[in-house]
Amino acid sequence: MNTNNHNHNVLVELKGIGKFYGRGQRQIRAVENVNFKIHDGEFVALLGPSGCGKSTLLRMITGLMPPSAGEVLYRGEPLRGVNEHATIVFQSFALFPWLTVQANVEVALQARGVASDERRARALKLIDLVGLDGFESAYPRELSGGMRQKVGFARALAVEPELLCLDEPFSALDVLSAESLRGELMELWTSRALPTRAILLVSHNIEEAVMMADRIIVMDKDPGRVVTEIQVALPQPRHRKDLHFLAMVDRVYASVAGETPREPTALMGTAPDEPGKTEMLPHAPINAIAGLVEYLAEEGKRADLYFVGEKLGTELDEFLPAVEATELLGMATLQGGDIELTPLGETFAATTILARKEIFAQRIRSLPIFQWIVDELQHAPEHRLPQEFFLKVLESDFTSEEAERQLDIAINWGRYAEVFEFDDDRDELYLPANGLTLVGVGDTISSRK
Ligand code: ADP
Ligand code: MG
């Protein structure tokens, strides 16, 4: 696409954008100091794990919400209120069930005061363009998910936006519909059949981003921020099996997953009841972690992250947490897009269930959140506390939804390792009466050295 990015070609510019939800102690820093530009002619992908602020950025770019800090410029002018030049397609489009396909597309034009004859003509043309010719008078309930999403695209395109924003528009579709809709969008875009000047696609699927975008802006969370930008200089159409394509996917994987050693303290954070930032446990249940470690052991301990992701499910939201967990637990290291088992990881893969639990227990005892839970249980009557107790404290660091997920993961890990038990009937955590767990955490660790 467009390669000479002079300033007059800039459609959108984000300058020092921050967005904070809520106030005081519970304030969530959704994104911090985000700077990037989108040029005329560009297809840009925003890639990152869920919760890193992608949708938040889209809402600010389209003017649905103002930033808390910084400025959004559109064609060099500060954006005030709704951005008339941009539209969003969401993950699942809310079509009006009582309107036909055609009427659903016309709605957008009606809102902008387009006369009825022109409305009709434009809607029919777009319906044709997205491949729904013949379905003009069908109702949404008569359409497949993929077709409904096409109506959504047609509606978004009806107002001829300069900037088309797509918020994970394929992720609610089955694999085949998603693939065909991607293909059709790319064809419309590369053939310049659309009046659209630029596309901004939010995605948490690496392959999708590499398949479609000219440039990928890689984000990470806590706080939401831009980590790096990657230019994808591959001609369209692109092919999944192409070596250059695979090399690019690899590179993006490497930048998303990061590299080990990061600061060990940054990995750990502080306990939830202490001042300072509490690091989140990755949302990876034991099965996912064990599955990854076993797979790596079979593959000869070092493997390309991309291929492992393919093998175990490409969705970043499932795969990356497992990668993060093996790293956090010292079972694997990351480097240059590869993941490699450590000797501990190899031992884990090769040993008995009992020894696995032992390894796991030893590792998680060094994490502040587990030290805190065990410590509280040791000082509680009968070494028992309701889960509510832990949730309350976690809620000072996380949203209530995240606090629940954190406790779920902690219980999943803790139970497996028999560091503590969970009573499903009473929703209580407790220490087993005769376990090693009655020994202080510090003692346990030092006595095993
Ligand atoms: P993404 O689209 O990358 O998944 P979001 O932009 O939806 O991320 O969210 C970024 C962060 O902001 C998350 O921690 C999310 O929980 C929080 N967040 C998003 N919207 C709101 C809101 N309306 N109120 C409070 N927190 C929010
Ligand atoms: Mg989102």
Image (cartoon, rainbow, N blue to C red):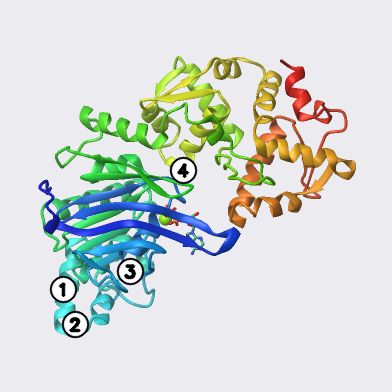
Check disc 3 and give the amino acid type.
Gly
Residue drawn at x 69%, y 46% as measured from the top left: 273
Q: Which residue is mark 1?
A: 122
Distance from the alpha carbon under mark 1 to that under mark 3? 25 Å
**Disc 4 residue type (three-letter):** Asp
User: x%, y% of residue 412?
Assistant: 66, 38
Q: Amino acid at mark 1?
A: Arg
Q: Are marks 2 and 1 in contact (CB under 8 Å)?
A: yes
Q: Assess mark 4: CB under 8 A from ligand 1?
A: no
Answer with mark 3 or mark 2, whichever residue precedes in sequence.
3
Q: Position of residue 321 (x, y in %)?
A: 50, 37
The tag earlier along the polypeptide, 1 or 3, is 3
**Gap between marks 1 and 4 measured at Cα:** 39 Å
The relative height of residue 265 versus residue 215 in the rendered view (above or below) is above
* Closer to us: 50 or 22: 22
Q: Is mark 2 within 8 Å of ligand 2?
A: no
Circle 3 — which element?
loop
Q: Which mark is residue 114?
A: 2
Instruction: Name the residue located 77 percent from the left edge and 46 percent from the top edge.
Output: 424
The answer to which of 374 and 133 lies nearer the viewer is 374
Q: Secondary structure at mark 4?
A: helix
Q: Which residue is mark 3?
A: 63
Nearer-N-terminus badge (4/3) = 3
Task: State which quadrant residue 302 falls in.
Answer: top left
Residue 148 visible here: no
Q: Looking at the rendering, which quadrant does residue 112 occupy? A: bottom left
